[in-house]
Image (cartoon, helix red, strand yellow):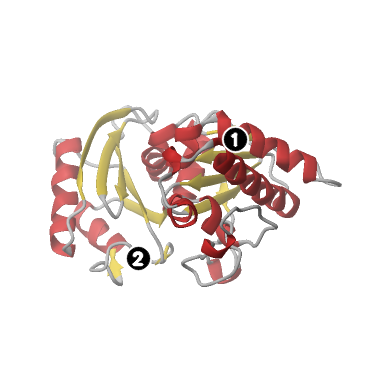
């Protein structure tokens, strides 16, 4: 990966464009956040873009921007910068990269949030492994896989969907296991925030110990598959479900993975040290280092 020339006057801007919130931050040449602002995501496209421009002005104070990056939900084309995030119905085929480069005259990168998070973990999370897999458990489930710091992409440059693997699961309510993708037995349908609500009829924070044991078992089986297929050096876990339960979820999942994994070595499995800042730090890392 070719690093951009940096100096003390460099200013990098990151945009976390979510379905419910917008977060914009400015950082210096070392990746230190100088200022950040957050607000709810407007429903209308024009209002959303206007809000981003105001927030960028706030964090930069009108200073020249060295480079920018954005994390947003898919689907999108990371090469052209055209985005159509599912959870923002008015954002369809929006040329976000063209809009931002025309206005700010600087490099601009955009990718799905899980890839951005993986890059953030690689550069700022203290686990700069040769093969790093980031997995998030929040409202949904997703992941980003890096090889030597670069995002691994599938056929035609598409984003691999690790959440939609089928596992041999344990669940006291199997009739409620339905995935939004339409496929059977998906891991996301069992352990994501939405999946937990459908299966157990309550949010993750209200699960009892037996229910958490099922979630941990299913997570462990999913990690086993990922470890066997991708052979990562480290798997970093983030997202609200993981951060809320912590090692009480991760420790048994790690154990299940190791017990069921044969032939290939078990990777390190760690909770994200960046926690809730993973996405915004990922945008800063991508602004600094790019996606290729």
The local crowd at label 1, few if under 14, some if 14 to 19, many if 20 or more residues have their Cα within 10 Å, is many
Q: Is residue 126 left or right of residue 19?
A: right
Q: Are marks 1 and 2 in contact (CB under 8 Å)?
A: no
The location of residue 23, given as percent across then percent down, is 26, 43
Foreground: disc 1 or disc 2:
1
Which residue occupies 67% across, 37% down?
254
The x, y position of residue 215, in whole percent, is: 58, 45
Distance between the Cα atoms at labels 1 and 2? Answer: 29 Å
Looking at the rendered structure, the secondary structure element under dot 1 is helix
**For mark 2, what is the residue?**
86
At 35% from the left and 65% from the top, the residue drawn is: 86
Q: Is residue 91 left or right of residue 152?
A: left
| Residue visible at 23% across and 68% down in the picture | 90
Q: Which mark is residue 32?
A: none
Residue 193 at least partly seen: yes
Q: Front-most of 140 and 215?
A: 215
Q: Nearer the viewer, residue 7 or 169?
A: 169
Residue 173 appears in which quarter of the rendering?
bottom right
Q: Quadrant of residue 63?
A: top left
Q: Is residue 184 shown left or right of residue 13?
A: right
Label 1 vs 2, first from the N-terminus: 2
Left or right of residue 64: residue 234: right
Between 98 and 19, the one lying in front of the other is 19
Q: Residues within 10 Å of mark 2 (few under 14, many from 20)?
A: some
| 210 or 122: nearer the viewer | 210
Q: Is residue 290 visible?
A: no
Is 101 placed above or below 27 here?
A: below
Is 20 rendered above or below residue 97?
above
Pointer 1 residue: 250
Residue 156's spot in the image, x, y percent?
56, 71
- Disc 2 element: loop
> Residue 161: horizontal and vertical position, in percent?
55, 61
């Amino acid at each position: 990966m070719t690093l951009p020339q940096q100096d003390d006057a460099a200013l990098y801007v990151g945009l976390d464009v979510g379905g419910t919130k917008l977060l914009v931050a400015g950082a210096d040449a070392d990746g230190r956040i100088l200022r950040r602002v957050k607000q709810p995501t407007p429903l209308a496209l024009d209002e959303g873009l206007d809000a981003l421009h105001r927030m960028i002005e706030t964090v930069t104070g009108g200073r020249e921007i060295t480079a920018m990056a954005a994390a947003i939900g898919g689907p999108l084309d990371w090469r052209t910068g055209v985005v159509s995030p599912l959870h923002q119905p008015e954002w369809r085929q929006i040329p976000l990269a063209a809009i931002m480069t025309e206005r700010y005259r600087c490099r601009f990168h955009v990718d799905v949030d899980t890839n951005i998070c993986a890059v953030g973990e690689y550069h700022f999370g203290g686990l700069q492994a040769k093969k790093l897999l980031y997995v998030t458990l929040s409202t949904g489930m997703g992941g980003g896989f890096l090889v030597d710091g670069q995002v691994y992409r599938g056929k035609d440059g598409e984003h691999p969907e690790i959440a939609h693997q089928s596992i041999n699961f344990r669940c006291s309510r199997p009739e409620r296991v339905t995935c939004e993708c339409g496929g059977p037995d998906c891991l996301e349908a069992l352990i994501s925030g939405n999946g937990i609500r459908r299966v157990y009829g309550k949010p993750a924070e209200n699960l009892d110990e037996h229910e958490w044991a099922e979630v941990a078992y299913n997570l462990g089986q999913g990690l086993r598959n990922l470890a066997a297929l991708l052979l990562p050096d480290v798997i970093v876990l983030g997202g609200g479900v993981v951060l809320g339960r912590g090692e009480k979820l991760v420790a048994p999942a790690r154990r299940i993975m190791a017990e069921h994994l044969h032939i290939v070595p078990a990777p390190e499995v760690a909770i994200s040290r960046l926690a809730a800042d993973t996405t915004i730090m990922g945008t800063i890392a991508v602004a600094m280092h790019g996606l290729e």
